């Protein structure tokens, strides 16, 4: 995507989405007790970004089409899918290592609130999709109309982090560590998830889901403690640094190959 869209064109739907997401999320928080669903099983607030995206799409309709990204080749999607799975494995490995160094026990697979672990994996998938439809399906593509991929990913990560308003009552360590984690993961997912909205959402949902499952298996309900959020931040930062270095190396290699090809053509001419 290019950065040629007039500011007003992208700004109105972007601000509308953010506002609606926060309002919808607040309403879903109020609805949670009445739903009878334990938030440890499925936090309805996770559906807030999807609701915000849906209403924004309904409001702006055809005006959003030119602002949303085009498809990328299937080959690129598959390659990024493989890399994303590798990144999730690295994240889980670093997370477990940090927790062991901290002396934290690992939780393992078990049910929550009487719900079997297998069912939890499905509810976690629903929650991840609900968030990613908004963050990577609406907010980031809109931001990419005016900002670079990296800048759009960082802003998306900050909004994503601030949206978890409960962290601001948990102390500065949790706040800083959590925001570092959301920004790092947003940069990672932003570079993996390219193409159409649904291409992006599918891959981002997979990564979000696997990261949340790793946190559940490793920490259980201790994921929001200082040690848990620090471990999460370290795992996210290390994983993102490794794969961003890989992306940079691949880009340099492609640049050199293109330069050699141009020189070869010049010589042949």
Image: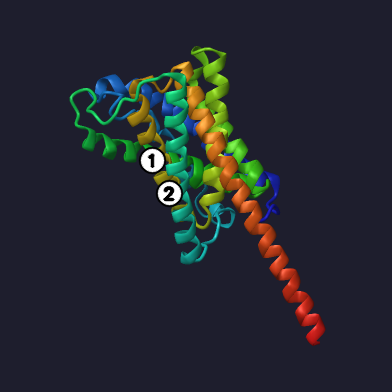
Can you give x and y, in whole percent of width and height, for residue 222 in the image? 38, 20
Q: Which residue is mark 2?
A: 85
Residue 9 is labelled as none
Q: Nearer the viewer, residue 244 or 72?
A: 244
Quarter of the image for residue 112 reads top left
Does residue 100 lie above or below 2 as drawn?
above
Element type at marker 1?
helix
Can you give x and y, in whole percent of width and height, for residue 264 in the image? 76, 80
Can you give x and y, in whole percent of width and height, for residue 57 in the image? 47, 47
Q: Residues within 10 Å of mark 1 (few under 14, many from 20)?
A: many
Q: CA distance from mark 1 to mark 2?
A: 9 Å
How many marks do you count on the picture? 2
Q: Which residue is mark 1?
A: 210
Q: Residues within 10 Å of mark 2 (few under 14, many from 20)?
A: some
Left or right relative to 92: residue 187? right
Residue at the extreme bottom: 269
């Amino acid at each position: 995507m290019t950065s040629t869209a007039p500011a007003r064109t992208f700004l109105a739907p972007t601000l509308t989405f953010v506002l609606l997401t926060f309002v919808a999320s607040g309403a879903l928080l109020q609805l949670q007790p009445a739903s009878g669903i334990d938030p440890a099983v499925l936090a309805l607030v996770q559906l807030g970004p999807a609701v915000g995206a849906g209403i924004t799409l309904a409001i702006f309709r055809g005006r959003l089409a030119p602002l949303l990204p085009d498809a990328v080749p299937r080959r690129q999607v598959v390659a990024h899918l493989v890399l994303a799975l590798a990144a999730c494995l690295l994240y889980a490995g670093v997370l477990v290592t940090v927790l062991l160094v901290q002396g934290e026990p690992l939780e393992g697979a078990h049910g929550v609130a009487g719900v079997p672990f297998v069912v939890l994996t499905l509810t976690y998938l629903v929650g991840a999709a609900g968030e990613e439809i908004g963050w990577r399906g609406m907010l980031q593509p809109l931001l990419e109309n005016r900002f670079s991929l990296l800048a759009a990913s960082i802003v998306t990560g900050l909004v994503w982090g601030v949206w978890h308003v409960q962290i601001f009552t948990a102390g500065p360590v949790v706040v800083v560590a959590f925001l570092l984690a959301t920004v790092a993961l947003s940069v990672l997912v932003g570079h993996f998830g390219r193409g159409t909205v649904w291409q992006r959402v599918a891959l981002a949902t997979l990564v979000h889901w696997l990261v949340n499952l790793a946190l559940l298996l490793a920490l259980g309900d201790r994921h929001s403690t200082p040690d848990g959020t620090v471990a999460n931040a370290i795992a996210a930062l290390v994983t993102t640094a490794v794969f961003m270095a890989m992306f940079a190396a691949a880009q340099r290699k492609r640049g050199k190959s293109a330069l050699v090809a141009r020189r070869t053509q010049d010589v042949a001419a």
